[in-house]
Amino acid sequence: MKLKLLKLSLILNLCALTALPAAHAADKVKIGFVSTLSGPSSALGVDIKNGFDLAVKLNGGNLGGLPAEVLVGDDQFKPDVAKQFFEKFIKRDKVDFMTGVVFSNIMLAALPEAIDDKVFYVSPNAAPSSIAGKDCNPYFFAVSWPNDAYHESAGQYASTKGYKSAYILAPNYVAGKDSLAGFKRFYNGKVIGEVYTKLGQLDYSAELADIRAAKPDIVYTFLPGGMGINFIKQFVAAGLNKDIKLVLPGFSSDQDIIRSVGEDMLGIYDAAHWAPEMTNAANKKFVAEFEKEYKRLPSVYASQGYDTALLIDAAVRASKGNLEDKELLRKNLKEAKFASVRGDFKFGNNQFPVQNYYLREVVKDSQGRLVNRIMGQPIFTNRGDAFSNECMMK
């Protein structure tokens, strides 16, 4: 129902963007930041927040030349709690932007609060495929990638590598279904098992027994946060890694996972749009400053939080602090020029990124640390998504 309402409001929202009167520069920019900051999956939200906070700090506490006030809410991994924070920050606190949510089901529950009040939601992570296509909206921008993208890349890699059979597994919610659909879109082998588990599940003994019996060439999973940590530990403990290749999306093999799992991660392949070792100047600065500030290597999530703040910074600056002119602000968000940690950054017509995706391998760096290293040329170059042609926006 919520997605239908978003779709029905698209044309009205586009018209409303052009109907607002001119306004003067604001004296500050207010951000509502809602994320999962407690519980088993909190590492993801914490990393996004740390990346966002770092960008604001390096900007002297400003975004777009204006003092930045960031209001923070912990959604506790609960859609209703996220919705309450969105309503509070938008209606009572009158924020200029919303951001922060990790999980698609939580974001979809809360997003109508922003859309209905014509507040831009800049997503550092959750980016459901429907919003990339038929339910695209002028008030939604994704800084990360559409839900399918990492999985499409992994499917393409598995096909290129010649893996003939795959067992695929994800939680039973929007992003989980998008993930396996994306993998299958580019995988030309045989899927001999497709399983959807309970969101937040931590015991995978039944699934591992099924995998052992199925004997696939590879296992591909989308299990973010604590779910992925537990699956990898249990997969290795069961000895399945000796005969079956485990291939993952980048966030399921990222620094938060590596820190918890340790050397069992060595040799695992994954697909992602970013890696700590990228040599562009913006990324070198980000990684060095993140390590200095937080005493750990950044994750994909942290990089996306950082870029989210830089995008808002660029758009507010280009708008000369005029936050009430929604048409101008949308234009400057869509055309924003900033030094992204991933290199060149641009949006497609649906306000989702067009970017490269890479194969990464977990290796030891020169300091003996476990890190993701990019292997060879991109799997996809300047890849948009499979849904942009369904988006009505220009």
Image (cartoon, helix red, strand yellow):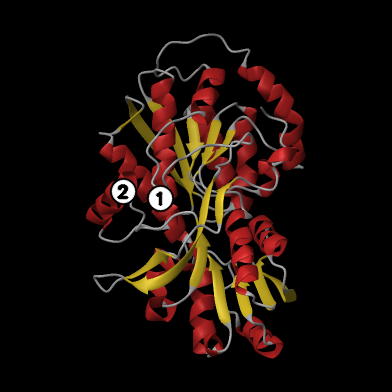
The image quadrant of residue 340 is top left
For the point 30% across and 70% down, the residue is: 365
Instruction: Report the number of numbered marks.
Output: 2
Question: Residue 40, how many percent across, how many down?
Answer: 48, 66
Of labels 1 and 2, earlier in sequence is 2
The three-letter amino acid code for the residue at tag 1 is Ser
Q: CA distance from mark 1 to mark 2?
A: 8 Å
For the point 54% across and 31% down, the residue is: 120
Q: Secondary structure at mark 2?
A: helix
Question: Residue 289, how many percent across, how many down?
Answer: 25, 50
Residue highlighted by disc 1: 303
The three-letter amino acid code for the residue at tag 2 is Phe
Q: Is residue 124 visible?
A: yes
Looking at this view, is 340 or 232 the one in front?
340
Q: Is residue 38 left or right of residue 145?
A: left
Image quarter (top left, top right, bottom left or bottom right) of the N terminus? top right
For the point 52% across and 70% down, the residue is: 228
Q: Is residue 350 left or right of residue 308?
A: right
Question: Residue 221, how many percent across, how many down?
Answer: 60, 70
Q: Is residue 313 left or right of residue 12?
A: left
For the point 67% across and 72% down, the residue is: 168
Residue highlighted by disc 2: 286
CB of mark 1 within 8 Å of CB of mark 2? Answer: yes
Question: Residue 48, how many percent across, how many down?
Answer: 42, 50
